[in-house]
Image (spheres, coloured by chain):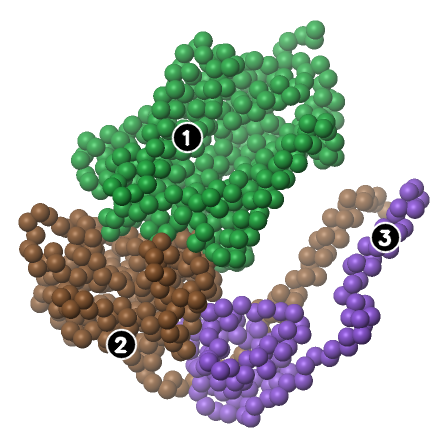
């Protein structure tokens, strides 16, 4: 009979304990609800490559319009902390010089300089944020090109925020619940410690609705459609107007276009 | 045994502390039983015993299916197509969270953090 | 062997008590952070990494620098480092643990840390960073345990440990390269998007790490009877000198590229780091200016042989190297990367008091582990080799 030392016995006991603990874990993973094929109540909006075209010339700057921001932030329970440090924003306005830092010059046309640029997540085709996320809490949906966000998996490392060339992402530095004016009960809030961003209203698209900002704009300055559909509004606009994208040279292939 | 006068009482104390969950409540006269819940009309997503034991796993599966696989709908046992939604579907039938969900959770001493984000509609 | 950490002089226990007090106080602030969130730090939507990740970056370098002692001894038979390898490895272990601790306190949802392993993402450098850091920790624990155990018994270590030690050498280089990749692969941040980031990291690591080791050896020499001799310390100081020269050279290369090309996107970060911006705190510019000053002092003290060989000036040189690199690779690297922002805005980042306290807590934990490990090393050495002979020198 082989001699066992106390240490050897403890090693085997530890391995056995780990082995015994494996079964409940495997059971939990294995159980799922079996499903018949469901019939969705409303047909979803689908596309092969969603894109947005923002006609900046139509944006109502003089009236201080913030309808798109208000619509998005209220429908998605985005908190307002009142200070730039903790700020969470999915869509916002910048002037031309800050939205396109490499494009401005001294003798820019006054109307361009004074115009509002609408900034949001660009849902890039080659997103650096997706590349760097260590848990795949953010990923690019192959079916329609949206850059998705899974708040359940996000560990709050903020690598995606460092990687985003557009500053599109926000982090919940504190509990957002206390600073939401009116909670919309049809959409969850987030908890502190996760990153969030514009989702191109993915939940509305699945119900056949256009993104909230596009619908809310009183000047109809935003178009949203399928780039792979040659007849879509976005393709028509891009073919007939001058358009630019933010920081195009970085190769991220952003899908938000600006008509200037 | 060396130092028996320290070891034996020490062992007894350790065993007492470690088995605290077993004898504390009966000794204090608390004989709580798991709460008896009231159920609304209609069928649930799966049969009651399965739901009782596995609603956590079911919700996790729903979570992954809705968020990551864009599979938002399921066929309810009564034949209708419904949304996989904690706030919408689950709380749609089990309207009072405090009466239904919290009673068992409090008894079992668990604090699911789902509701940190997912909204409990007003008045529930 | 571990029991050696639990016996000691009153002075030893006073030091342990002080560390535990520091950790305890910092822990309270960490609990505050867990309750209120990372809002208690100075971080903001635009500057999302700061003091914590700065420490991670610096300490990965310190951990990697153990290779500077292991490589000459095992690969090139430089016997002079024979007594030092264990001290180098026992420095690497708490350094890696502190790295992981700093990531942990920086995360928004630390309880979900296992998601990194449950959902591995080969495209993510951060995933690889966790993998290589864990691997390095395991490597160092195994190597130090096996070699030191053998030394204690007075026998040669088992032959299988040799390839493991050989593996630790490129692994050490890799942990710091992967950490550099965290930064140098991001198209968003022009300050970081430079091929020289990894070489710069390695050079600064091989300057700061050996400097810390020199200080620890001198401290140990003062407090105990352990004395590895003058030759290894001198050799380490030479390594630190060349590494510091390389580090400063690489930084000057960056400055040249930025300012000779005249590209505003590149120059603006340097301008902000040293000149600040109107309306913002001058905390970072002053730290950077001090860093440069300390680097100059360090180079003078290291390059002049008379200063390098004198223990008193060597200590000053090491402190200057460590402080200069800690600032430059820490707060300088973080703030420089984020400011000006992607929309070319200038944003303040000043670490808050809470942030410093949590940082000190982690450093306290590292110091505690380091103290325990060094106590073990020295106590066992005192048993094995009571005369503390310098290798190659006959006993007195």
Q: Residue at x 11, y 56 (%)?
A: A113
Q: Secondary structure at mark 2?
A: loop
Q: Is C125 left, or right, of B124 in this rendering?
A: left
SS at circle 1: helix
Q: Residue at x 92, y 46 (%)?
A: B5
Neighbours of disc 2 within 10 Å: few (<14), some (14-19), many (20+): many
Instruction: Indicate the secondary structure of the residue bearing disc 3.
Output: helix
Q: Which chain is tinted green?
A: C
Q: Are marks 3 and 2 on the same chain?
A: no
**Tag of residue C325:** 1
Describe residue A61's horizontal placement relative to residue C318 as left or right: left
Q: Residue at x 47, y 44 (%)?
A: C353
Q: Nearer the viewer, residue C295 or C160?
A: C295
According to the image, label 3 marks what residue? B11
Q: Is residue A29 visible?
A: yes
Give the crowd class for mark 1: few <14, some 14-19, many >=20 residues within 10 Å. Answer: many
Q: CA distance from mark 3 to mark 2?
A: 68 Å
Which residue shows up at 9% across the image and 65% down it? A241
Quadrant location, the C terminus of chain A:
bottom left
Chain A on-screen colour: brown
Q: Chain of mark 1?
A: C
The x, y position of residue B100, in whole percent, is 59, 82
Q: Chain of mark 2?
A: A
Q: Are marks 2 and 1 on the same chain?
A: no
Q: How far from the left and from the top, in percent, is residue A185?
A: 41, 78
Residue B56, quarter of the rendered image: bottom right
């Amino acid at each position: 009979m082989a001699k066992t030392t106390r240490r050897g016995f403890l090693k085997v006991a530890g391995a056995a304990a780990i082995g015994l603990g494996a079964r409940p874990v495997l059971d939990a993973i294995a159980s799922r609800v079996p499903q018949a094929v469901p019939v969705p109540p409303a047909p979803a909006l689908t596309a092969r490559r969603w894109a947005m075209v923002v006609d900046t010339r139509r944006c109502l700057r003089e009236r201080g319009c913030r309808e798109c921001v208000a619509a998005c932030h209220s429908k998605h329970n985005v908190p307002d902390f009142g200070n730039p440090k903790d700020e969470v924003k999915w869509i916002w306005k910048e002037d031309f010089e800050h939205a396109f830092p490499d494009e401005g010059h001294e003798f820019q046309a006054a109307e361009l300089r004074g115009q509002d640029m609408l900034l949001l997540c660009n849902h890039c085709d080659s997103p650096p944020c997706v590349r760097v996320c260590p848990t795949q809490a953010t990923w690019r949906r192959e079916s329609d090109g949206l850059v998705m966000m899974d708040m359940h998996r996000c560990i709050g490392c903020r690598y995606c925020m460092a990687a985003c060339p557009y500053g599109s992402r926000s982090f919940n530095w504190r509990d957002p619940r206390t600073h939401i004016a009116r909670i919309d009960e049809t959409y969850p809030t987030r908890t502190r410690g996760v990153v969030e961003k514009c989702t191109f209203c993915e939940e509305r698209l699945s119900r056949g609705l256009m993104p909230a900002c596009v619908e809310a704009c009183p000047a109809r300055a935003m178009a949203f459609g399928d780039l792979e559909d040659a007849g879509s509004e976005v393709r028509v606009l891009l073919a007939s107007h001058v358009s630019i994208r933010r920081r195009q040279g970085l190769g991220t292939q952003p899908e938000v276009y600006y008509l200037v | 045994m060396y130092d028996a006068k320290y070891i034996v009482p020490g062992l007894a104390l350790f065993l007492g502390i470690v088995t605290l969950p077993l004898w504390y409540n009966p000794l204090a006269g608390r004989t709580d039983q798991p709460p008896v819940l009231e159920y609304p009309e209609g069928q649930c997503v799966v049969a009651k015993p399965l739901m009782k034991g596995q609603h956590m796993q079911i919700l996790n599966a729903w979570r992954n299916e809705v968020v990551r696989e864009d599979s938002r709908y399921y066929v309810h046992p009564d034949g209708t197509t419904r949304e996989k939604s904690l706030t919408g579907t689950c709380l749609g039938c089990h309207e009072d969270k405090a009466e239904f969900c919290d009673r068992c959770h409090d008894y079992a001493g668990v604090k699911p953090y789902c509701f940190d984000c997912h909204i409990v509609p007003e008045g529930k | 062997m571990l029991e050696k950490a639990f016996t000691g002089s009153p002075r030893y226990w006073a030091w342990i008590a002080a560390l535990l007090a520091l950790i305890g106080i910092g822990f309270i602030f960490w609990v505050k952070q867990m309750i209120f969130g990372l809002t208690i730090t100075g971080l903001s939507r635009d500057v999302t990494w700061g003091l914590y990740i700065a420490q991670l970056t610096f300490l990965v370098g310190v951990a990697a620098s153990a290779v500077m002692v292991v490589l000459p001894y095992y690969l090139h038979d430089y016997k002079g480092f024979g007594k030092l390898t264990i001290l180098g490895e026992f420095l690497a272990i708490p350094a890696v643990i502190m790295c992981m601790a700093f990531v942990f306190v920086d995360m928004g949802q630390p309880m979900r840390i296992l998601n990194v392993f449950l959902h591995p993402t080969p495209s993510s450098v951060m995933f690889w960073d966790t993998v290589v850091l864990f691997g390095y920790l395991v490597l160092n624990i195994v190597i130090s345990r096996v070699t030191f155990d053998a030394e204690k018994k007075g026998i040669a270590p088992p032959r299988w440990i040799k390839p493991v030690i050989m593996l630790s050498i490129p692994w050490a280089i890799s942990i710091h390269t992967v950490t550099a990749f965290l930064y140098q692969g991001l198209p968003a941040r022009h300050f970081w998007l430079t091929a020289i980031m990894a070489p710069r990291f390695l050079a600064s690591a091989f300057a700061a790490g050996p400097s810390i080791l020199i200080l620890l050896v001198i401290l140990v020499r003062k407090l105990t009877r352990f004395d590895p001799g003058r030759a290894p310390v001198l050799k380490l100081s030479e390594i630190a000198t060349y590494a510091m020269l390389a580090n400063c050279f690489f930084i000057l290369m960056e400055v040249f590229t930025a300012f000779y090309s005249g590209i505003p996107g590149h120059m603006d970060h340097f301008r902000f780091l040293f000149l600040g911006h109107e309306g913002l705190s001058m905390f970072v510019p002053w730290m950077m200016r001090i860093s440069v000053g300390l680097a100059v002092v360090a180079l003078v003290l290291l390059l002049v042989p008379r200063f390098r060989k004198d223990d008193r000036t060597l200590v000053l040189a090491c402190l200057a190297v460590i402080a200069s690199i800690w600032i430059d690779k820490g707060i300088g690297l973080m703030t420089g990367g984020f400011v000006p922002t992607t929309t070319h805005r200038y944003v303040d980042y000043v670490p808050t008091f809470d942030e410093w306290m949590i940082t000190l807590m982690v450093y306290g934990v590292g110091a505690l582990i380091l103290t325990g490990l060094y106590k073990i090393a020295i106590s066992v050495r005192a048993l094995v080799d009571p005369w503390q002979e310098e290798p190659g020198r006959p006993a007195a």
